[in-house]
Amino acid sequence: MNIPFNQPERTPDPALDEQLDRRLAELYGPRKFYPTTSCSSALQMAAEVAKIQPGDEVILPSFTYVTTAMPFVKRGAVLVFAEIDPVTCVMDLDDVARKLSERTRAIVPVHYAGISPDMDHLVRLVEARPIRIIEDAAQGIDATYKGRPLGTIGDIGAVSFHHTKNISTGEGGLLILNAEDLQDTADVVYEKGTDRRAFISGEVDRYSWVSVGGSYEMAPPLKRLLLGELDLLPQIRSERRRVYDTYMKHLAGLPLILPELPDYARSNHHIFHVQVSSKTLRDQVIKRMREEGIQTTFHYQPLHNSSFGQQRGYDRFDLPVTDRVADRLLRLPIYPTLSEEQVCYITDTLSRILEENQ
Ligand SMILES: *Cc1c(COP(=O)(O)O)cnc(C)c1O
């Protein structure tokens, strides 16, 4: 007789984890992977793995989603907001250099629209300092910096599989661990604060509560879904690129700031954004486009100006580029199933509306 303690058909199959690990290694190279319930929870894990302490300073852009900042706020860190580049909207590394201090413990670049800042430059900035680079690569799946996948360059990378991202498990994420010295801590954090991984590998004979952690692991049905989604990446990137290229061709010459790709970047075309000349015009364009049946939208309210940011006094940061971009940026629909006809309707309508408002 062989009677397992848990109902066998409900017990996760280790072969699935091995298969997903292998597949992720094909994409990212040999790394430690922790599939998570979301990118937000991967970032929460990252703050715990990096052992951010109360009073530690964390440098990040203000032009980002709340959960880039939240894990560090929860650990009592002091947020230090850096400016962004006015065209690519990624963190301005000269401003990061000015804001480095003795208390800086982490820097969180956000790979906006699948484009990173100049990561070699960032790595040089933190050299020989006790600072972790945590890449918010939520939008970074299938995009690279100098041929290296986003999320694999800093100490830790966090990717999202939310339904708005290029591939999706509904909700889901991935923590990529690049810094080998953090692996034991990451194992404990991922196992809810226990040394269960050491127990599974036979290093200890029972497992117990050893530190902080959480319930971060992606559920097995979503891991299976993720394997299927990963296979779609090349096709998704090429379809998004088609839409991107059509936008670029048809919008050239209009009074807009079009996106630019740095030489080092291979984008995944996660977002198509333009900037118009004022907030009034941007809001008017969104309204008129909606009347023509096209949903367009702005993006982040900068975190330093948010209601929580103000409560914490973060509105003391002077970030004119961030404010200007947030006011003037407009996102157009971009996804694989948009037809050429739909894309042309969008560009024709946009150009007509811009003309109306000249
Ligand atoms: C989508 C996104 C997140 C959050 O990802 P979830 O998987 O929804 O938790 C965090 N940061 C950025 C920049 C994002 O775009």
Image (tube, helix red, strand yellow):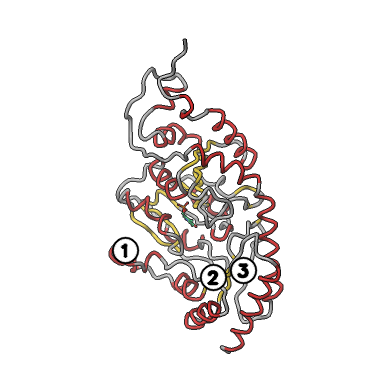
Quarter of the image for residue 112 reads bottom right
* Tag 1: amino acid: Phe
Which residue appears at 70% of the width and 66% of the height?
Answer: 245
Task: Indicate whether 18 appears above or below 326.
Answer: above
| Residue 189 located left or right of residue 298 | left
Between 292 and 57, the one lying in front of the other is 292
Of the two numbered discs 2 and 3 in the rendering, the one whose residue sits closer to the viewer: 3
- Camera-side residue: 85 or 235? 235
Q: Amino acid at mark 3?
A: Pro
Helix, strand or loop for disc 2? loop
Badge 2 or badge 1: first in the primary sequence: 2
Q: Secondary structure at mark 3?
A: loop
Marked residue nearer the N-terminal end (1 or 3): 3
| 1 and 3 marks in contact (CB < 8 Å) | no
Q: Residues within 10 Å of mark 2 (few under 14, many from 20)?
A: some
Point out residue 233 in the picture as x, y percentages from the top left corner. 65, 49
Residue furthest top as drawn: 1
Q: CA distance from mark 2 to mark 3?
A: 10 Å
Kindly identify which numbered label has been placed on residue 55: none
| Most foreground residue, 101 or 22 | 22
Sort mark 1 into few (<14), some (14-19) or many (20+) by Cα contacts within 10 Å.
Answer: few
Whether residue 9 is situated above or below residue 87 in the rendered picture: above
Residue beneath disc 2: 86
Q: Is mark 2 within 8 Å of ligand 1?
A: no
Is residue 125 something that shows in the picture?
no
The residue at 56%/58% (across/down) is 117
Residue for badge 1: 308
- Return the x and y of residue 66 as percentages of the image width and height: 40, 58
Task: Please state the horizontal and vertical placement of residue 140, each as a whole percent of the image.
Answer: 57, 53
Residue on which the image places disc 3:
259
| Residue 271 percent across, percent down from the top left | 58, 63
